[in-house]
Image (cartoon, coloured by chain):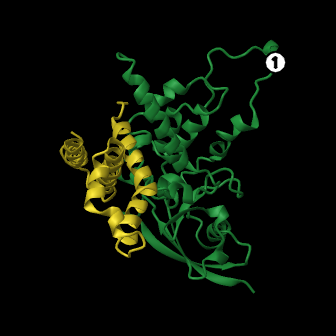
């Protein structure tokens, strides 16, 4: 039997799952509820402050992790759901699905790096 | 007075039936009556041509797997009292029907053999070296997976096996994991070739229905996920060992 290259995608899926389970809800709570409801004052999340956060290497790393890794989770889930629905997509579709996650991760990293330099 | 239940059974007699056909039987039952006993009643009193597999009557031999209202069950562990609306009994899904409720399980048996379900050790300890120590913690790593009775209910439940018969499947992978985790065993490297393949642990998308239907509370889905962790480690190690 041939060794599967699935561990690579499963690893990214696992990492994304961890982020989506532990940190995405916090991000949604803060940016989607607490700030709009005024529980956290809006000036704490003013454009300047968030920009400064994203231009610090640690802040950039946090944003990259929260944005990129769940993309791998989503694309992995969608790709495997195709199979569960009986659509046995080939390598082209696989490349397309994981390509979206890869492109999103690279785009996010590029934008953040531009802010850092 | 015993109540009477209508039991519908999917019959298939290859010498007369072109395709499986439903047949209904009226079976008087008491509170304690299992589906396996109902089948025995049908065979003894109503239709001696009915075929089904059974042996122990106590959920240990794994012979009487069948679909009850579309759910994989052991006939001996299923009671008529729990089905007030009646029962539709069919041969175990995802296996070819041989006759009536009897399926051809040879594919599963081949897969079971392929995972080398026995302790492999080329250099066993001699008796003079004393006994093999295995702590309760060591044993906990594999014990639940050793409770499998090879009944095949998990294969009937598994949508991946239904879609693609090359998938090694829940029970075989759980038993593979059971021997890999046993500290008396030295056969892990051989078995990892199966785990690492698309047909091995990676064919599973963690639907988890196998663990729900298991009559012995084995958790094959967990065994396969642990297999994925093992395989991911193996993948990284293999990157540093080119040529293997």
B131 with respect to A79 (left or right): right
Residue A7 figure quarter: top left
Secondary element at tag 1:
loop
Residue B130 figure quarter: top right
Residue A42's x, y, as percent?
34, 69
The residue drawn where x is 26% and y is 55% is A87
Residue closest to the eye, B191 or A79: A79
Q: What count of labels does the image hold? A: 1
Residue closest to the eye, A20 or B206: A20
Q: Colour of chain A?
A: yellow
B70 with respect to A48 (left or right): right
Question: Where is B232 relative to B92, above or below?
Answer: above
Q: Report which residue position mark 1 lands on.
A: B130
Residue B187's x, y, as percent?
56, 24
Q: Is residue A86 visible?
A: no
Residue B11's x, y, as percent?
47, 66
B138 with respect to B228 (left or right): right
Question: Where is A37 relative to B78, above or below?
Answer: below
The residue drawn where x is 42% and y is 73% is A39
- Tell me the quarter of the image containing the C terminus of chain B: top left
Residue closest to the eye, B98 or A109: A109
Q: Chain B is drawn in which colour?
A: green
- Tell me the quarter of the image containing the N terminus of chain B: bottom right
The chain to which mark 1 is attached is B
Question: Where is A56 relative to B5, above or below?
Answer: above
Residue A73's x, y, as percent?
35, 51
Q: Is residue B46 visible?
A: yes
- Dot 1: few (<14), some (14–19), or many (≥20) neighbours within 10 Å? few
B173 with respect to B121 (left or right): left
The residue drawn where x is 33% and y is 63% is A45
């Amino acid at each position: 039997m041939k060794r599967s290259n699935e561990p690579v995608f499963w690893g990214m899926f696992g990492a994304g799952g961890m982020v989506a389970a532990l940190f995405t809800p916090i991000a949604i709570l803060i940016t989607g509820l607490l700030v709009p409801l005024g529980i956290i004052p809006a000036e704490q999340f003013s454009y300047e402050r968030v920009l400064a956060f994203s231009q610090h290497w640690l802040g950039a790393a946090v944003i990259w992790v929260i944005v990129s890794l769940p993309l791998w989770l989503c694309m992995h889930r969608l790709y495997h759901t195709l199979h569960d629905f009986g659509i046995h997509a080939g390598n082209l579709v696989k490349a397309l699905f994981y390509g979206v996650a890869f492109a999103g991760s690279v785009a996010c990293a590029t934008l953040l790096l531009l802010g850092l330099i | 007075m015993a109540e009477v239940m209508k039991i519908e059974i999917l019959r298939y007699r290859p010498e007369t039936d072109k395709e499986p056909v439903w047949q209904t039987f009226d079976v008087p039952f008491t509170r304690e009556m299992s589906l396996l006993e109902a089948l025995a009643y049908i065979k003894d009193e109503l239709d001696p041509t009915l075929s089904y597999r059974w042996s122990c009557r106590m959920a240990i031999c794994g012979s009487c797997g069948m679909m009850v209202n579309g759910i994989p069950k052991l006939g001996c562990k299923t009671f008529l009292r729990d089905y007030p609306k009646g029962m539709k009994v069919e041969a175990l899904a995802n296996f070819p029907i041989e006759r009536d409720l009897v399926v051809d399980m040879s594919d599963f048996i081949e897969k079971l053999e392929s995972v080398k379900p026995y302790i492999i050790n080329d250099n066993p300890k001699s008796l003079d070296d004393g006994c093999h120590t295995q702590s309760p913690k060591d044993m906990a790593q594999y014990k639940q997976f050793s409770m499998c009775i090879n009944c095949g209910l998990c294969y009937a439940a598994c949508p991946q096996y239904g879609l693609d018969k090359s998938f090694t499947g829940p029970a075989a992978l759980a038993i593979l994991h059971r021997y890999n985790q046993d500290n008396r065993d030295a056969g892990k490297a051989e078995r990892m070739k199966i785990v690492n393949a698309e047909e091995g642990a990676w064919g599973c998308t963690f639907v988890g229905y196998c663990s729900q239907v298991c009559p012995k509370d084995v958790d094959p889905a967990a065994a396969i996920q642990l297999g994925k962790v093992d395989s991911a480690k193996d993948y990284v190690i293999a990157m540093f060992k080119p040529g293997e």
